[in-house]
Amino acid sequence: MSLCPYSVFLLLFILLTSSNANNEQRLHLKRLQRTHQSNSPSCYSQKSKSENGATILEMQHKDYCSGSVTNMNRNHQKLLIVDDDIRVRSIQASIKNIISGKIETLSQTKIPISSGVKLHSLNYIVTVTLGGRNTTVIVDTGSDLTWVQCQPCRLCYNQPEPLFNPSVSPTYHKVVCNSSVCQTLQSATGNSGQCGNDLQDCNYVVSYGDGSYTRGELGQDHLVLGSTSVENFVFGCGRNNKGLFGLASGLMGLGRSDLSLISQTFETFGGVFSYCLPSAEAKSSGSLVLGGDSNTSIFKNSTPISYTRMLANPQLVTFYFLNLTGVTIGGVAIQDSGFGKSGMIIDSGTVITRLPPTVYKGVKAEFLKQFSGYPFKQGVSILDTCFDLSAYEEVSIPTVKMQFEGGGEMEVDVTGVLFIVKSDASQVCLALASLQYDDEIGIIGNYQQKNTRVIYDMKQSQVGFAKETCSF
């Protein structure tokens, strides 16, 4: 059977347009531009549900929950310049100290405490019940210790919710100094537990890279996650807390040490959790799923889940390491000899993804080749590839995909490729940044994880990715 010339042309046109559709996406700029919000909803006492053996907590972006938003341009630049950059530099400096032998173990570093909690609006929150009271906390895979502000408080930042009061909780009790639980602080926070004045309290100190900190004593209380109860949950009762913690009452540590929520609930949830981070601009909710099968039907993913193994790093036990083997821009593979040679941290606390300099150079060059014809704009802080898109309603941008060992792949959502610095789109930047040196550790930030189901399976030691439009 032969095809007429018209049929051949039509077939080629369909194939080419189909291929092109897979390699680029339409970004509607007007929908993403950040405007003044005077009546943002309250995000406290968020919803929860149970389904197919899993507990599902509603997750929302703090930008959508912070009420009136003023001068977003200045706030965004501050977030990038001060907070996110400090977090990454703190991580890299600590890793270098370990490699050079100046620091032999994680317990002597501040790596696990360079947490994303210092970011005022680019983080994600959930609501749990602790000691019978609803408490809204930031979700952070780069931290282990869960903590909340407590009464009486010597120094506390402002929060909308009442401070946690252990004296009115009948199920609260202190962790005794020199107990085995107290000793786990060493790996979880980088500081060993210290005895209080009465030689009974197990005091903790967590210091952050920007000068923020939380101090208090370890306690145990009844924690409720959706409809799942956790007895004697160990957390930090913060009596002295200072820094840019936003409106949250504390932090939920989803790291890998014994004190993290994942480790403490291992018998209940089997070491499996996942999240879908919603876009703040979409004013939607995402979800934090605890437990269930890692291939569970409760996910709403639109693509199959692809997995990659977690890399073991005994010196950096808090973080989740993956092996990045490639990056494609609009279907074009970036050529770099550095792929597959060192681990990348996947982190819900860091905002902007950091790539090794040679990898970033190749990514930037290919992106500019495909995203051409737009007026350039001066860079801002860590973002050096910027454009003036104020004259455009929408633009076509090349699809960005990250490949990992074993066939795992994460396609960056269209809202995670460009970062709108100025609300009128007069300064829009490629939302990727370069590390200072090739020997530093790359980080996959939360901005690139939006609208993606990211699954952590501690039993199988693997992380999975699938596209999903976040909802609850």
Image (cartoon, rainbow, N blue to C red):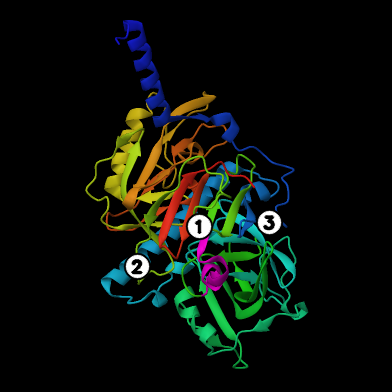
Question: Toward which corner of the image does residue 88 lie, by quadrant?
Answer: bottom left
Left or right, 419 with respect to 283, comes to left
Residue highlighted by disc 3: 48
Image location of residue 411, percent across then percent down: 43, 41
Please tell me the numbered disc located at residue 421. none
Q: Secondary structure at mark 3?
A: strand
Q: CA distance from mark 3 to mark 2?
A: 34 Å
Please report contact status of discs 1 and 2: CB closer than 8 Å, yes or no: no
Residue highlighted by disc 1: 349
- The span picked out in magenta is 259-273
Q: Secondary structure at mark 1?
A: loop
Question: Toward which corner of the image does residue 268 lie, by quadrant?
Answer: bottom right
Q: Residue at x 73, y 47 (%)?
A: 41
Image location of residue 206, percent across then percent down: 52, 73
Q: Quadrant of the N terminus?
A: top left
- Amino acid, disc 2: Asn
Q: Residue furthest front?
A: 1
Q: Nearer the viewer, mark 3 or mark 2?
A: 3
Please report contact status of discs 1 and 3: CB closer than 8 Å, yes or no: no
Asked if 27 appears above or below 326 in the picture, the reply is above
Q: Nearer the viewer, mark 1 or mark 2?
A: 2
Of 62 and 286, the residue lying toward us: 286
For the residue carrying disc 2, how many other residues have a C-alpha within 10 Å: few (<14), some (14-19), or many (20+)? few
For the residue carrying disc 1, how many other residues have a C-alpha within 10 Å: few (<14), some (14-19), or many (20+)? many
Q: Earlier in the sequence, mark 1 or mark 3?
A: 3
